[in-house]
Image (tube, helix red, strand yellow):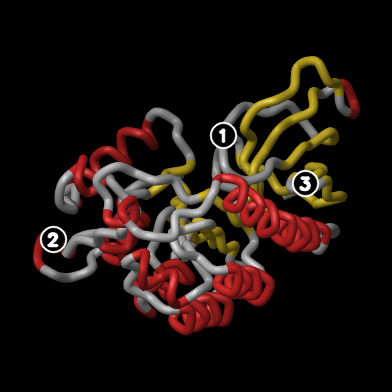
Amino acid sequence: RNKHCTYCAIPMVRGVYRSVPEEDIIEEARSLAERGVRELILVAQETTLYGTDLDGKKHLPRLLKRLCREVEDIFIRLLYCYPEEITPELIQVIKEEPKILHYLDMPIQSGSDQVLKRMGRRTSTSQIREIVQMLRKEIPDICLRTTLITGFPGETSEEHEETLAMVEELCFDRLGVFPYSREEGTPAALMKGQLTEAVKKRRRDQIMKLQQKIAFAKNQSLKGITMQAMIEGSIPEEEGENGHPVYIARTYRDAPDVDGLLFLPSVQRDHESGDMIKVLITAAKGYDLIGKEVEA
């Protein structure tokens, strides 16, 4: 089964959806773990469809269980999971397996049913609400990331307002917004009602201004909480307390490159990249956090 969103040229370039055999993924994961990699990111054009091209069944839950059972010293992060393909079985695996981070990247693209239809998305805003509610009920500390496309052809000001309302209602922890880009050869490129770059940028900025308020408030709410963090590196030119450098780390709530960072001016010993430590969040600074190492 293959999904062809009206705005995306990737299926034309890459062809039909193909799942890498389980054994190959397990072998690659073992190889990475043996080389010291601590965090494995599972990502595909549609991660939750894994296995459906082989026998029509979704095998992501089974693959995750095998990775957790057969690969040592790793954590697993899931990116690009379509909301309509997130099943109760998958949620239970994420909930029950300690190696799977309580983080899910789930692109919804729009908060307007009419825009979703024009995009060729096989979901509705009511389905999106249901899956977000289910995830937060089953995994209360889950961190949800999403992406949106703003300024899609024909998007009215009312449809844009619907997206703003959904962003405010669902309060995603992480959110990225991309102005619609006209890709040659796609159905959307031929649609009437192409919007100007100025309109697309203005709508993107409105969404990000709202999301910034949500994200900053969520970060502030983490003050006083202890959690695990993985050391990414240090800032050599900055000296922290007791002669140690200021370390940079990430919590389960932060995917590399796209989310925030945790800065640690106070640690109990020197660390190397990949070390897992326990930290107390002491402050929030915009999208980033500040903390200190505490006894595990």
Where is mark 1, residue-wise? 274
**In-image side of 142 versus 9 (left or right):** right
Q: Are marks 1 and 2 in contact (CB under 8 Å)?
A: no
Q: CA distance from mark 2 to mark 3?
A: 41 Å
Kindly identify the amino acid type of the residue bearing the numbered disc 2. Answer: Asp
Assign a secondary structure to mark 1.
loop
Assign a secondary structure to mark 3.
strand
Q: Position of residue 128 (x, y in %)?
A: 47, 76
Q: CA distance from mark 3 to mark 1?
A: 18 Å
Q: Nearer the viewer, mark 2 or mark 3?
A: 2
Where is mark 2, residue-wise? 53
Q: How many labels were placed on the picture?
A: 3
Q: Residue visible at 36% across and 49% down?
A: 43
Q: Are marks 2 and 3 in contact (CB under 8 Å)?
A: no
First in sequence: mark 1 vs mark 2: 2
Q: Residue furthest left?
A: 55
Dot 3, how many residues are within 10 Å of its Cα: few (below 14), some (14-19), or many (20+)? many
Q: CA distance from mark 1 to mark 2?
A: 35 Å
Q: Position of residue 109 (x, y in %)?
A: 47, 62
First in sequence: mark 2 vs mark 3: 2
Q: Is residue 116 above or below residue 253?
A: below
Q: Quadrant of residue 161?
A: bottom right
Where is mark 3, residue-wise? 289
Q: Nearer the viewer, mark 1 or mark 2?
A: 2
Asked whether 10 or 44 is in front, the reply is 10
Q: Residue visible at 46% across and 58% down?
A: 152
Tell me, yes or no, if residue 294 can be seen here: no
